[in-house]
Amino acid sequence: MARKPNVTTYFENGVWKNKVDGNSRASNVSATKAQAEQTGRKMAVDRSAEHVIKNRDGRIGEKNSYGKDPHPPKG
């Protein structure tokens, strides 16, 4: 089964952006990180993908997966 492309929320050129892996441009821009996270989360849920949220410095701050877990917890 093919892996779904991640949705990444990141800061660039004074604005927060969301981009789907493999796309050359951001899907949308937001003035605040909270707005971008909310939009990015919806994009990831709609795609059953992972949402990667980066800090202002570009380092990964958080990751959330949406969709079917191929390795659910046992017990």
Image (cartoon, grey):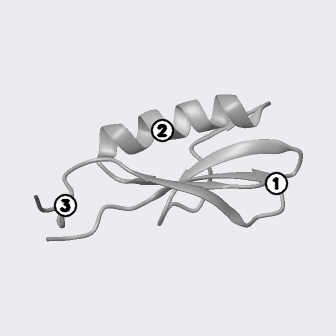
Mark sitting earlier along the chain (1/3): 1
User: Where does residue 64 sit, x and y in percent of width and height?
Assistant: 45, 51
- Three-letter amino acid code at disc 2? Arg
Q: Amino acid at mark 3?
A: Pro
Q: Which residue is disc 1 drawn over?
A: 56
Q: Are marks 3 and 2 in contact (CB under 8 Å)?
A: no
Q: Position of residue 2 (x, y in %)?
A: 21, 70
Q: Nearer the viewer, residue 69 or 32?
A: 69
Q: Residue at x 77, y 32 (%)?
A: 32
Seen in the image, is 20 located left or right of residue 48? right
Mark in the foreground, 3 or 2:
3
Seen at 43% across and 39% down, the residue is: 43
- Give the SS element for disc 1: loop
Residue nearer the viewer, 21 or 37:
37
x, y percentage for residue 49? 35, 53
Of all residues, the one furthest to the right in this rendering is 14
Q: Residue at x 21, y 58 (%)?
A: 69
Image position of 39 (left or right of 71): right
**In which quadrant of the rendered image does the C terminus lie?**
bottom left
Label 2: few (<14), some or many (≥20) within 10 Å?
Answer: many
User: Looking at the image, how many numbered discs can be counted on the residues?
Assistant: 3
According to the picture, the residue beneath numbered tag 3 turns out to be 73
Marks 1 and 2, how far apart in space? 18 Å
According to the picture, the residue beneath numbered tag 2 turns out to be 41
* Contact? badges 1 and 2 (CB < 8 Å): no
> In the rendered image of this protein, does residue 66 appear above or below residue 69?
above
